[in-house]
Amino acid sequence: MEKEIIAVGDSAALEIIFSTRKYKSRVAKKPRIQTNEGPPDKYVQISADVVLRPDSTYPIVINPYKIDLSQFTEKVIKKAKFKITNVSDQELDISLKSLPRDLFEVSLPGSIKPGGTESGEIKLLNDALEKSFEKSITIQLTDADSSRFTIPIKRTVRDMTKKLGATEAPGK
């Protein structure tokens, strides 16, 4: 949580991580939230359609369907592009529903014509360049179902200077 104490009438963001690795098809989870208010505990409903083949989703296909901004050399990896293809027969507006604002910015097309492909971009903020994380963004469409798609974003940073220093030490 972003705050330890929440006053009456106040609110705070709470991050809930739902790993879909072992699931497929329709999944629903209800994480329990305990407070010092006492019983009854509160619950949040999370529902997802976990797709085994991300290249066959509807009404859009996102490529790549997950973004890796990992950095294993001194070359700074700061941004990544992705494509969104509209495989439906209607124009779709796209809006950003969630993202970790402390890590990156997202650029999205406003809409995509039927059969069209547009680009999006994830750009790391300078404060996030040295961080490793596994996060995601969620976009929403204006189709009849108000479909939402979540794009996983991973970053692993390895400090090559420490690794070189450790391997050079025995030879000195």
Image: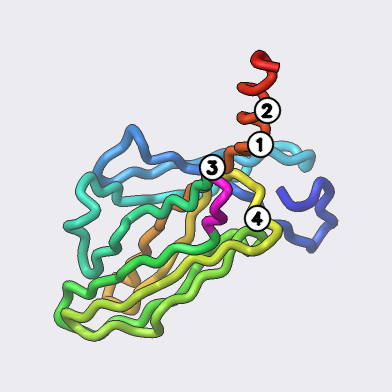
Q: Amino acid at mark 4?
A: Ala
Magenta stretch: includes residue 122 = no
Residue 161 got which mark? Answer: 1
Q: Quadrant of residue 37?
A: top right
At 54% from the left and 66% from the top, the residue drawn is 123
Magenta stretch: includes residue 76 = yes
Q: Amino acid at mark 3?
A: Thr
Q: Which residue is mark 4?
A: 128
Q: Which residue is mark 3?
A: 156
Q: Quadrant of residue 24?
A: top left
Q: Nearer the viewer, mark 3 or mark 2?
A: 2
Q: CA distance from mark 2 to mark 1?
A: 6 Å
x then y, percent, for residue 151: 40, 57
Q: Quadrant of residue 83?
A: bottom left
At 53% from the left and 64% from the top, the residue drawn is 98
Q: Nearer the viewer, mark 2 or mark 4?
A: 2
Dot 4: element: helix
Q: CA distance from mark 2 to mark 4?
A: 24 Å
